[in-house]
Image (cartoon, rainbow, N blue to C red):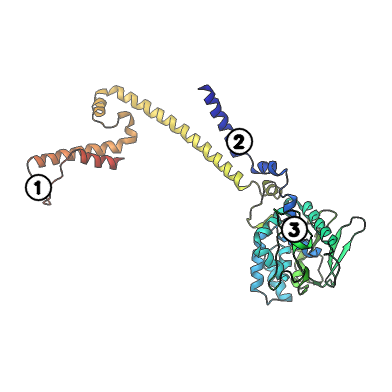
Amino acid sequence: MKKKTVLAKSLAVFLALLLFAPQWVIAQSEDGGKTFKQEELDQLLAPIALYPDSLLAQILMASTYPLEVVEAARWAKKNEGLKGDALTSALEKEDWDPSVKSLVNFHQVLDMMNEKLDWTQKLGDAFLAQQKDVMDTVQKLREKAKAQGNLKSSEEQKVVVEKETKTIIIESANPQVVYVPTYSPTVVYGTWPYPSYPPYYYYPPGYTAGAALFSFGVGVAMGAAWGYAWGNCNWHGGDVNVNINQNANINKNIDRSKYQNKVTGGQGGRGEWKHNPEHRKGVSYRDQGTAQKFDRGKSRDTQSREAFRGRAEAGRQDIARGGADQFRGKADAGRQTSSGRSQAGSLDRGGSPRSTDRSAFGGYERGSQTRDSSSRGRQSLSSSGGMSRGGGMSRPSGGGGGGRGGGRGR
């Protein structure tokens, strides 16, 4: 018996620890402290790793605000006719992050991020949790594409390889026009090493798969929205740098002062890009560590567990108070029983509740007494053969009547 008791207590302790342990601790023990494995990062970044650096930076930042991406994609379709200053004035009224606004020029990119929303959110989660790993993965994928002969300079883009670091930089051949490449990730990088993690892909409307290994659509002229594109890849630091004065000549109607203290970690609107939780708009973070990093407190699971603890504690206090009140009530009833035992005995034998429980069943007891009186009256009428006033036979009292009354009492 003692062994069973000890085993039961041990099991209870284990279940309690499992229930209240932070979920991020469990998650980290499973993946070695990494939110995404390398094969998952390759899978996520394959469709955009060969984009120009400036455009890639906007996508990475914007992916951390998936709800705003959806809003911007819908807004862009409704306002396709807006150009120049009119577009700037309209965008200034929206409270989206600048990186999201910068993508309004690129309908193909916004459509991709909107239609592949699961990919967009995972990409943002990866960039928030493992920013340097994301940047390193892009470089590794570019190296693979270049080794296959599928990444080189052209009329649309300029591919530069730094001599010392071997860092691969992709720029627009014409600073005023950005071309978005379309390619097959399963081919352009050579044999894909992770069959269980096939790369994401997106082919814009009108694209014929297999027609060209690496192609460009119509170039996108840098319009008003691109004035918000003041982020760029910092390959040596493994992050994205921001300078809000960048692209100032493209659009001078943007109120840049309101972004200075929100989008960078430096001074004067330049420095390392920092995620702004305000633009997350309620979208939950993937893991507890990221949530804490951006001062979003505890995850929903943790909040639920704390709420449960609060309710449990309140319940224990209520039970304690209720037990004390019940004890006092029974003690008082016991004293009353001692002084009037003969009366209480007659009620007990009659099947009604004991006097010690009158406070809980007082209504039931009074109802029973009323029904007994009514039954005696009906029996008297029945024995004399009388009729009720309405001309109907009075129902005889008995076990059935008592049963109905008892059911209502319960």
Labels 1 and 3: the sequence-earlier one: 3
The total number of labels drawn is 3
Q: Quadrant of residue 323?
A: top left
Sequence-wise first label, 2 or 1? 2
Residue tagged by mark 2? 17
Which amino acid does the dot numbered 1 rest on? Met
Q: Residue at x 74, y 59 (%)?
A: 61
Crowd tier of the residue under label 3, counting other residues whose Cα lies within 10 Å: few below 14, some 14–19, many 20 or above: many
Q: Residue at x 44, y 29 (%)?
A: 324
Residue position for label 3:
45
Report helix, strand or loop for mark 2: helix
Q: Position of residue 351 (x, y in %)?
A: 25, 31
Which one is in front, 210 or 59? 210
Vertical placement of residue 293 versus 325, above or below: below
**Between disc 3 and disc 2, whose residue precedes?**
2
Structural crowding at the residue carrying mark 1, measured as other residues with C-alpha within 10 Å and reported as few (<14), some (14–19) or many (≥20): few
